[in-house]
Amino acid sequence: MGYMQGIVLFVLLLVCWSPYLLSWLPGGTYSDTNAVIMQALGHIPLSNRHTVLYVLLWRFSFWLAGLAGQGEFAGALVMLGIQAVSMAAFATYCVRWLVEHGIGKRGCVLVAAFFALCPLVPHYVVAQWKDTIFSISLAYFALCFIDAAMLKGKPAILAARVCAGALLVAFTRNNGIYIALLALAVLVLIHRRRIKAVAVCLIVPLAACMAFTLAIQGPVYSILGWNVDSTVESLGVPLQQVARTFAFDGDMSVEAREYFNSILPGETWNEAYRPFIVDSIKWNGSFNTERLDHTRGEFLRCYLETGFRNPLRYLEAFLMSNSGFWDPAVGWAENVAYVNTEISPANPPSYWQVDAIEALTGISLRDALEPKVIVSPAVFVWIMLASISVLLVRRRYVLAAALAPAWGLWLTLLVATPLAYSLRYCFALVLLIPVFVAVQFGDFSEPGETMPSSAGTPAG
């Protein structure tokens, strides 16, 4: 696909999404987004809870609007434009990438139509939360990582792209660093037999990027006071397991029971427990967050001891707390952060949403464009797993491993589920559906087929 064709596709995508964009100007905000806006405007201190990079994007948007003498509405409009342009740029790049991997003209037309017509794509352009930017970043990283794993391209370009993708993933959501580190480990495993040939040109640059990220997000953010997340934010699944043990009167030592009661009274554990969501526990008015923050070691010891006494309860709680990411039957009837086109009433920004189409024509398209069917996130997980399974059956083990950013995202959600059936956390899998299909038919040669073992650098 030539540059002119790419520009045409880019513009056509924005045109196809324009009814959604114009119906909900300047986009929809979630409660999390409103916290980010407050940070961007300087009303509350900056923190990495919703990632510093995302806050800075909002701050840049407001600054740009301010240069033109405009207020928060215009700033949010700039942010909406950033999301729309980023999504269109990724979709265009994805089609071009598929062309380079032997997907024919007809296949690429179908992929372009998918991005243009699948309503979830413009819905997530309209939804202004960090998950949209993260999903675009992870989907881009997934394409770059496949090329790096299969050694498709010139070494310098491969390294630049995979490092850029890894940095974007690591800085746009807090589980991104774990996905990028997992991808680095998989890349080393894939190229273990030719490690000397690819170490300097590929492995070392990516490892250096990860070291840089850990340094910035660790000591640097801590010095600046940006690492302010409480322990409870990373213990969703363990808290659910403890709560289920209380709810079903499980076996628990006197010491463990006393400790857990010091965090939340015993009867409240029972009352607050909801199998599919931890928010009713961690946001309970009686939950002693400060106590948990200062006794992490004791929590871990009591948690493990109780787990050995109640393995079945722990397993049940684990499966139920992340069921939305493996059970397609969960989430069909409930819009829990499925898409968000409206402005959240909680801590609202000081601007109103406008239906520009209705204002200009007197006709609103909102009812027609709003999602009518809520699809479980697990559906998209199983599309990914089906693609990987076919690759394994075909003994395309390297290519299956090369999908590490996608299945790495899923694994992090299983380990630390933020919300049982929120599509926004794994929306990147929707963007990667064309890739899951294309890897079965395209030109994805094994590394040994594209680079002789005696070669000093990957083949271009």
Image: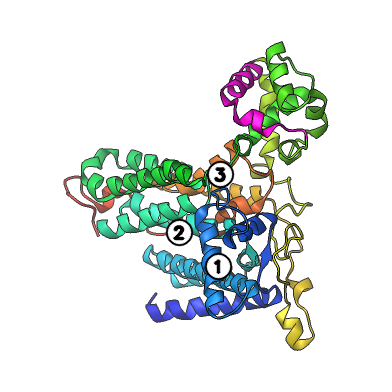
Q: Which residue is mark 3?
A: 410
Place of residue 46 in the rendered image (x, y in percent of width and height, measured from the top left): 55, 53
Question: Callout 2: few (<14), some (14-19), or many (20+) C-alpha neighbours within 10 Å?
Answer: many
Q: Is residue 274 left or right of residue 123?
A: right
Towards the viewer: 273 or 226: 226
Disc marking residue 83:
1
Nearer the N terminus, badge 2 or badge 3? 2
- Determine whether label 1 and label 2 are within 8 Å by CB: no
- Mark 3 and mark 1: Cα distance apart in space: 23 Å
Q: Tell me what residue is drawn at x 44 percent, y 67 percent.
A: 93
Q: Which residue is mark 2?
A: 140
Q: Is residue 104 left or right of residue 329?
A: left
Which residue: 68% across, 65% down? 28
Circle 3: residue type: Trp
Please tell me whether mark 3 or mark 1 is closer to you in this view.
Answer: 1
- Disc on the earlier residue, 3 or 1: 1
Residue at x 64%, y 36% (from the top left corner): 232
Seen in the picture, residue 149 relative to 115 is either above or below; the reply is above
Where is residue 212 drawn, in percent x and y? 36, 46
First to last magenta residue range: 286-308
